[in-house]
Amino acid sequence: MLFRSDINFAIDNAVVLSKATTEADDRWTDFVSTKEVGKDGSIEDSVLEYTSEEAVNSVNAMFNEAKVFDEKIISVSGTVIQSYGGFAIGNTEDLSKASRFTVGVGLTNVTAKSGNKTKTGSDFKLGRGIPNLDGVANSAAEKAVKLLDSEPLGKTAEMRVVLDNIASGIL
């Protein structure tokens, strides 16, 4: 279980470290100002209250969901991560910003086998709080089974690829 005091400790230490820097830079004038205020600093209590038992149960549920999808499923792995953090941006002259965050991630990889072909599908969900993982293992299992029917194109080609926001953000 995480506590808000842990997050505040991370922020306080980041601020102390930024103020401890003694190297001055006479070229510095000021920080870039940001015009928009986002959800920065939003803390989801669900992440702070998440227990190891809940993590194990979530991964177990992903396993059970994927293993019944198709008899070709030979392997299922699941990962659940709940995290928090804090940061400060500053230099010897000033402190620009300090903030904190929480994040929740659920990821599953499912492997299917048919004959001499083995394929793996994966899917994930993430958010500022605990993501609802219902269906994520089914989605990964469906991808793995569908990939078993894939065939080489027999040629090399240049193709356009369209990525959604999450996929492009990872790159």
Image (cartoon, helix red, strand yellow):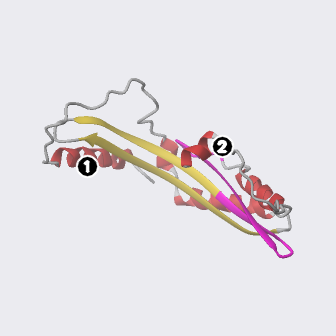
For image coordinates 46% across by 48% down, the residue present is 48
Q: Are marks 2 and 1 in contact (CB under 8 Å)?
A: no
Q: Identify which amino acid the numbered label 1 is placed on.
A: Asn
| Residue 33 image-quadrant placement | top left
Check if residue 112 falls in the magenta segment.
yes
Residue 13 is tagged as 1
- Measuring from the top left, give residue 162's x and y in whole percent: 68, 42
- Range shown magenta: 108-132
Kindly identify the amino acid type of the residue bearing the numbered disc 2. Answer: Leu
Determine the secondary structure under disc 2.
loop
Query: Splitting the image into 4 quarters, where does residue 37 fall?
Result: top left
Left or right of residue 146, residue 120 in this image: left
Residue at label 2? 163
**Quadrant location, the N terminus:** bottom left
Viewer-closest of 73 and 171 = 171
**Residue reaching furthest to the top:** 35
Q: Counting residues from the N terminus, which is met first, the one under dot 2 or under dot 1?
A: 1
Q: Residue at x 22, y 49 (%)?
A: 17
Q: Tell me if residue 22 is in the magenta stretch.
A: no
Q: Secondary structure at mark 1?
A: helix
Coordinates of residue 113 in the picture (x, y in percent): 81, 71
x and y, in percent, of residue 140 in the image? 73, 56
The image position of residue 5, as x and y in percent, is: 33, 46
